Image (tube, rainbow, N blue to C red):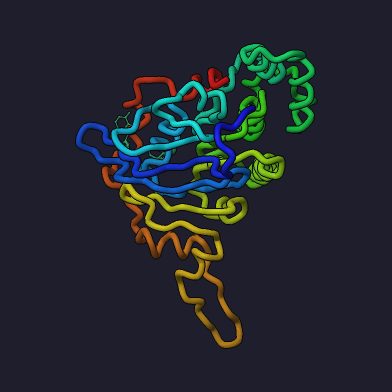
Amino acid sequence: MTTATVDAVGIRVQGVEKSFKDLHVLRGVDFNVKAGSIFALLGSNGAGKTTLVRILSTLLKADAGTATVNGFDVATAPGDVRRSISLTGQFAAVDEVLSGRENLVLVARLRHLKNPGAIADDLLARFSLTEAGNRRASTYSGGMRRRLDIAMSLIGSPPIIFLDEPTAGLDPQARIEVWQTVRQLAGQGTTVLLTTQYLDEAEQLADRIAILHKGTIIQSGTLAELKQLLPAAKVEYVEKQPSLEDVFLALVGDSAEPDSGEANSAQDDRTDSAIPVRKETR
Ligand SMILES: Nc1ncnc2c1ncn2[C@@H]1O[C@H](COP(=O)(O)OP(=O)(O)OP(=O)(O)O)[C@@H](O)[C@H]1O
Ligand SMILES: [Mg+2]
């Protein structure tokens, strides 16, 4: 995969705004993600995380601002952006009727890769799915399905990966497995932008963390930098470090209410299919 620029910025977001009718979801979002790093975007339900990921993956146009992904502008070079990324959406894009292996072979074929069977077998092994490989995905547990979903998004080795709530609904063991996968990816130089509501996930994985609230990034930095925002409380001889959760709640407020309060109905409003498009990003 070629990179358009030699600088080490994987994703650059400047002044991005997006409204849905009179709901001003993104009000000028700015951040950079260093190539090869893991960046976590934190925010409450309805904060606009998925909206931003959809803009960065060219599924949605911003109203204002610019964003480049792998050096390509999402507005003027969407084809190059799509060739540089893969998107694992908030809801798994696995075909339930097919087996895990068939799902992988299908994506490899769509990406015109040689030896789709060998690619599938390799990924099944990497994601501990070899035994289940020939079973229909409909029989998989949530964690297995998530792992298959992420495996599918790795086909073709895109330099930039978007993971929208990669471990939502997974049990602790499955979450740890997904985390290991994400760490491996970053270790190999892949840039990972993930959204999450699990603060421990950001603590565990991210090189840098940004908090999206009321349409802007209200704070960003390394975990250590964010923790310094709150003074360490001292109880006798034991120094208590604030957790990321303490920092998040102090910044966002305990109620952590989104602007509209309509986050749950958001999924129904969406007219286009965010998730199947993932397979077309070759
Ligand atoms: N296509 C759409 N039409 C109208 N409103 C939308 C649309 N997509 C998103 N919204 C609204 O924009 C806001 C942000 O939604 P978004 O899905 O980006 O939030 P999120 O941070 O991903 O939330 P969650 O954590 O629940 O996934 C919500 O209030 C939602 O209702
Ligand atoms: Mg979302």
Q: Is residue 184 left or right of residue 235?
A: right
Quarter holding residue 14: top left
Q: Is residue 47 above or below residue 88?
A: below
Closer to us: 265 or 205: 205
Quadrant including the C terminus: top right
Q: How many marks?
A: 0
Can I make out residue 145 in this image?
no
The residue nearer to you, when weighing 247 against 80, is 80
Residue occupying the far front of the picture: 6
Ligand 1 positioned in quadrant: top left
Tell whether 88 sits left or right of 178.
left
**Side of 12 where 26 appears, left or right:** left
Front residue of 281 and 254: 281
Seen at 25% across and 40% down, the residue is 24
Q: Residue at x 30, y 36 (%)?
A: 64
x, y (%) of residue 141? Answer: 64, 31
> Quadrant of the rendered structure where residue 139 is?
top right
Which residue is found at the position 52% from the left and 65% from the top? 225
> Looking at the image, which residue is at 49% across and 24% down?
275
